[in-house]
Image (spheres, rainbow, N blue to C red):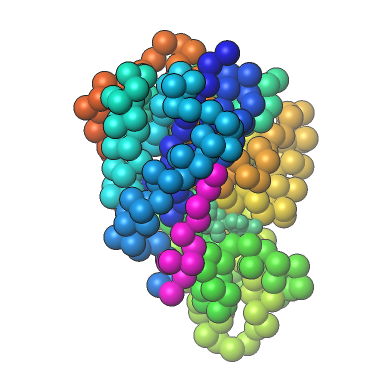
Amino acid sequence: MSIVLGIESSCDETAAALVTDGRVILAQRIASQDEAHRPYGGVVPEIAARAHAERIAPLIEATLADAGMTLDQVDAIAATAGPGLIGGVMVGLVTAKALAMATDKPLIAVNHLEGHALSPRLADASLEYPYLLLLVSGGHCQILLVEGVGRFRRIGTTIDDALGEAFDKSAKVLGLGYPGGPALERLALQGDARKVPLPRPLKGSEEPHFSFAGLKSAVLRAKQSGEYADADIAASFQQAAIDCLIDRTRRALAKAGPVNALVVAGGVAANKAIRGALETLAEAHSLPFIAPPLALCTDNAAMIAWAGVERFERGQSDPLDVAARPRWPLDPEAETVRGAGVKA
Ligand code: AMP
Ligand code: MG
């Protein structure tokens, strides 16, 4: 049996986990920084980096203690090496390097997006490559054909905002606080999705890309008009987002060729209405729909440890001078899409 320690620090969660090649999560801990960033309505990189630096060492110690293990019993140390907020990524990666050097264990530099992309295989042993993955989180919004470890074809991406970002910004407009995605979903349950006319950006277009900036602006105009109830705006926004998501994913399924499953990962996968709509789409294509448990959907270290397991099993590791990367696309061949600024 092999055991990998995983470390995650690319955004606002400091996390550590111990995962076996038998898909057992021996222990995992997550320290969220939501409280620290709440007054600013978004993640402040400087605050995030400092919080990671303060928390990471005790968090790793506590995770090992939870499992009743010492570092000597670990076979490899995996850490997120990007993409993400560079200050935080460096804290996690440098910590992993120090532990790897001190214990003479292999270091595995994990792409955070690969962690999300492979996490469904941690939860479901029957999931075989290739599968179509919808990766929807606060910072990422992509449709990927997952062909194997390190083998990804990006089928679609956002040309502006990520879906989670659109949820969070719309929630902010409605005064729902930060991070507002879950609160917006709750408010939408009380509203009527037909009340507020909102755009469906890029719906029907040939390439399965996304755009949410216009939808977010339309939510702001609807709120400022004073004509609509907040719950109706929330419900209409969520429905518009779902319509875009389903249309784009249907297009991606047509482009990707044969796949074994439709898989969703990332924090937005917590949204029940979105899960339901994707499940219906998968059924219509006679595909299994797989969504990892919620704890594996948002940022966590078990997925980083699992990506480490998949790489370790294939004899892969990285040199101790491997660099932290603020941007690190899973598919380096994928073209830059018009409008794609900071989103990988
Ligand atoms: P992550 O970036 O993977 O850590 O996920 C966090 C993102 O997921 C944030 O943008 C949240 O607002 C979003 N999110 C979490 N739960 C929900 C939900 N129920 N509905 C919509 N968005 C959500
Ligand atoms: Mg997060």
Judging depth in this view, the residue of 186 and 344 nearest the camera is: 186
At x 76% / y 42%, what residue is drawn?
A: 280
On the rendered structure, is 146 left or right of 86?
right
Q: Is residue 55 above or below residue 148?
A: below
Q: Is residue 116 magenta?
A: no
Q: How many marks?
A: 0
Q: Quadrant of the N terminus?
A: top right
Return the residue found at the far left: 321
At x 58% / y 75%, what residue is drawn?
A: 176
Q: Quadrant of the C terminus?
A: top left
Q: Quadrant of ligand 1?
A: bottom right
Q: Is residue 203 above or below residue 147?
A: below
At x 54% / y 73%, what residue is drawn?
A: 177
Does residue 300 appear in this view? no
Residue 253 placement (x, y as % from top left):
61, 32
Residue 241 placement (x, y as % from top left):
60, 58
Return the residue found at the far top: 315
Does residue 221 appear in this view? yes
Find the magenta span and give its range: 29-39
At x 46% / y 18%, what residue is drawn?
A: 75
Task: Choose top left, top right, bottom left or bottom right for residue 157.
Answer: top left
Judging depth in this view, the residue of 262 and 95 nearest the camera is: 95
Q: Is residue 35 magenta?
A: yes
Residue 284 placement (x, y as % from top left):
77, 35
Judging depth in this view, the residue of 285 and 133 nearest the camera is: 133
Residue 160 placement (x, y as % from top left):
40, 55
Judging depth in this view, the residue of 230 and 269 nearest the camera is: 269
On the rendered structure, is 185 left or right of 47?
right
Task: Choose top left, top right, bottom left or bottom right for residue 234.
Answer: bottom right
